[in-house]
Image: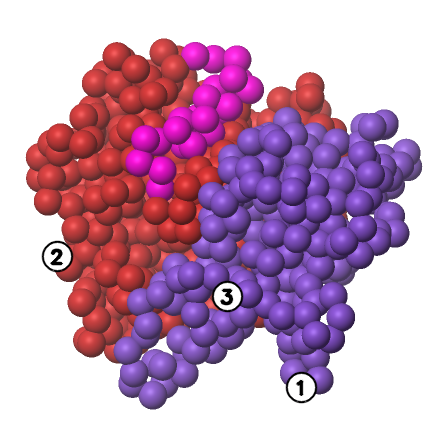
Amino acid sequence: MSEQVVVTGLAARSAFGPDTSALLARAFTGEPAFTPVRRFDATARRSGVAATLPGAPVLADELVAVIEDACRVAGDPGPRTGPLLLAAHADRSNAATAADVALRVGVAGGVRTYTAACVAASTAVADAATMIATGRHDRVVVAAGFLVDEDIFALFDAGRVLARDGAVRPFSTGRLGMVLGDAIAAVVLESASSAAERGARVRARLAGWGRCGDAYHVCQPRPDGTGMARAITSALDRAGVGPDDVGYVNANGTGTVFNDAAEAAALRLTFGDRLPRVPVSSTKSVHGHALEATGLLELVITVLALRAGRLPVNAGYLGPDVDCPLDVVVGRPRPSGARYALSVNAAFGGANTALLVGAP
Amino acid sequence: MTGLIAEPQPERRTASVELGPASVDLGPAATVDTGPAVLARGEWPVGPADTLPAIAGFVVSSFSPLVAEVAERCLTARYGTAPAATERTGVVLASVAGDVATTDTVAAALAAGRRVPPLLFFQSNPNAVVGYVTERWGLFGPVVCLSPAGDPYTDALEAAALLLDDGAADEVLVITADLARGPGERDHAVAVLVGPATSRRW
């Protein structure tokens, strides 16, 4: 593999609005978008809040809009001959949605939808990067969408993972679970040579990526964090950088007791004695958990934070938890000169991913 | 719309191999020209009397048992008993419609004002049964689930080739599974274990 992978376009829509400006601003101030659910009747559920777009958004329409936005940021690189990789909840309508979106945005290189739960989008990014690194394609568009709906809300309520206090408190004492949130995001990944050839502005490098399984359980993470640690190490090794080079971790941080503890264990395996000096935050604490789309939304935030030289706040934090001895970014955004940042995700089935973002 | 992601390069061809039934030992490597080498295969059903074992914790739908059974048949054909010989084995699960039985059960419960069974929380996602398979066989590679827009087997095999080419896995268990779409149809799934091609041209 010789081709370097860069990010030339990115866009996101969330409960904060149809672009990334308010999203990033609220990630820096730590103000969540959680409000009582009005999209459907949630009064019978243990939790009744989510982070939702206004009105009745349609997934295909939102995906088309965000892909167009990302391509515009990328300098509208002309005929979209490369493939389109989507991430969405496993659904019988996915093939039709994918075909519709591909047709409307003019992608001619084929389309595939990733459905691997909370690593669906980050897995799509890793596959897109592999396509570029191996010379299969010069440019790949990745887009992901999740809109909170009644069925999924009821399932998560039945699974007792939604926070009864309506707040996401990653790595914090007193954390009670997650809050679901809408997200639609897109990135344009490109070979460095292709970007240079057309004079495209490089927003960041996708310096490394890794994915590893836990081989442990249908829905619980391996408590010792070894699967996630291997994914992170794989991403670092691919980039040829060490843990000391990483200046920020945008964590999976769902706010659930066991997941956060397992992630903290994985970060300890990765960073060792340096762990107390590695800034960590989970922006799910403001935008909520966007399931299949969350990895892409968090990648976009990670890129923007690295460019801004400030690290997002881990909202909802009440105090340290003995199982999560991390340098959690709280209170205000932290100035940073980091050259590398990790975006980490994990999912049911013991799936773990790590994306390493490098400054251009 | 073909669903193919990797557009064929002049010197590349995707895997195309005639595979025998699950009980047939395919030998050390039923290689295909430049795609992944197919190491073993499992299928359900094999004959009209074939039965599908239940798996603990999965209810209502036959989707997850279907995936688990073809994985079992394929990996047993290759390794005999668990665990697999290599931990760096990934899993790609492709399903056009997914677990529609679970989806419809949740929708029906909500429509009737009934409680959603808690067990459906995790089995509503295809990752869950993959977690069952990987724990049983000790597979620590990447977990990829897909809704293919075209031919599921071709799409899944291309995803597996990416994992192998990326160095993310030494072998990949590729599963395609879909439930019966109506009367007269049966659930159907196929699993193949693939490894790197012996002669690559890309």
Whether residue B97 appears in this view of the structure is no
The residue identified by callout 2 is A165
Q: Nearer the viewer, residue B67 or B116?
A: B67
* Dot 2 amino acid type: Asp
The residue identified by callout 3 is B54
Comes first in the chain, label 1 or label 3 = 3
Same chain assignment for discs 1 and 3: yes
Give the magenta range.
A221-242
Which dot, 1 or 3, sits closer to the camera? 3
Q: Overall secondary structure of the magenta stretch?
A: helix
Quick one: SS at disc 3? Answer: loop
Could you tell me which residue is drawn at 30 percent across and 57 percent down? A180
- In the rendered image, the residue lying farthest to the front is B80
Q: Is residue B144 magenta?
A: no
Quick one: SS at disc 1? Answer: loop
The residue identified by callout 1 is B183
